[in-house]
Amino acid sequence: MTNLFSIFDPTTSMMNMPLNWISSIMAMMMLPNTYWMFNNRYKMLWNMPMKMLNNEFKILLNIKNNKGTTLIFMSTFMLIMINNLMGLFPYIFTSTSHLTMTLSMALPMWLAFMLFGWLKNTESMFMHLVPTGTPTVLMPFMVCIETISNIIRPGTLSVRLAANMIAGHLILTLLGNTTMSVSMDILPVMISIQMMLLILETAVAIIQGYVFAVLSTLYASETN
């Protein structure tokens, strides 16, 4: 490790294969075969939060009959959360800390929402460019501001997720390197701080997946 940011380097390879990206599907490999074969406790445990998310996303999308509309957002949440949690284990590359991963999720969804909105609901999309109650003098400026805010949405989604993952992992790495050189008197305090930070990072891993999915749902609801 030549610098702190080398833990976010995805180019580690063996036999010309980028093995670091395998972490994105590592959790799927760890699931027992019975998970895919029939109903079991794993599925029952996972279905509980998924049903809650499904109900919440239906409210955000303002749809009465769910015909699979929320599946993409639930799948996005599951993918991000699993990758974030897997990145907390030692020697596992956190793929969601890299813009290649986060932008690959945010940009296609945003493009799909924009194409659907401008082709199917053109008038509604124009209405979103001018908020209700805007003075006539400010309308041209509001159109420019809203247009820019719409264009930068995939960037803000991807950068927010990557930056949060990088920041938390950097703090844990810095404390881990410092702990090796402290005296035995301070060692229990450092270990306690690291444990609390690890709990915080676990919460951040779940929250960031939830934030990404909710913001994507809100962006989709504007086009409907």
Image (cartoon, grey):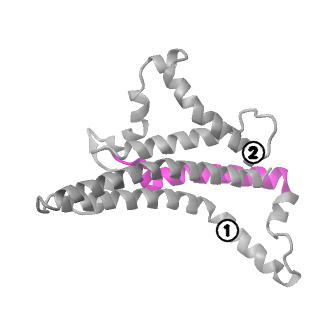
Q: What count of labels does the image hold? A: 2
Q: Which of the pair 124/191 is nearer the observer?
A: 191
Q: Residue at x 88, y 81 (%)?
A: 136
- Which is the main secondary structure of the residues drawn in magenta? helix
Location of residue 63 by image quarter = top right
Image spot of residue 216 (x, y percent): 64, 51
Q: Is 218 colored magenta in this rendering?
A: no
Image spot of residue 156 (x, y percent): 57, 63
Q: Which residue is mark 1?
A: 149
Residue type indicated by callout 2: Ile
Image spot of residue 208 (x, y percent): 51, 52
Q: Residue at x 14, y 63 (%)?
A: 182
Q: Which residue is mark 2?
A: 59
Apparent side of residue 18 relative to residue 58 in the rendered image (left or right):
left
Disc 1 is placed on an element classified as helix
Q: Nearer the viewer, mark 2 or mark 1?
A: 2
On screen, residue 34 above or below 64: above
Q: Is 117 colored magenta in this rendering?
A: yes
Q: Which of the pair 6/82 is nearer the observer?
A: 82
Apparent side of residue 39 relative to residue 59 in the rendered image (left or right):
left
| Real-space CA distance between mark 2 and mark 1, rounded to the nearest whole angstrom | 24 Å
Mark sitting earlier along the chain (2/1): 2
Q: Is residue 35 visible?
A: yes
Q: Residue at x 88, y 59 (%)?
A: 123
Image spot of residue 177 (x, y percent): 20, 59
Q: Residue most toward the bottom?
A: 137
Residues rendered magenta in the picture: 93-122
Residue type indicated by callout 1: Ser
* Quadrant showing the N terminus: bottom left
Disc 2 is placed on an element classified as helix
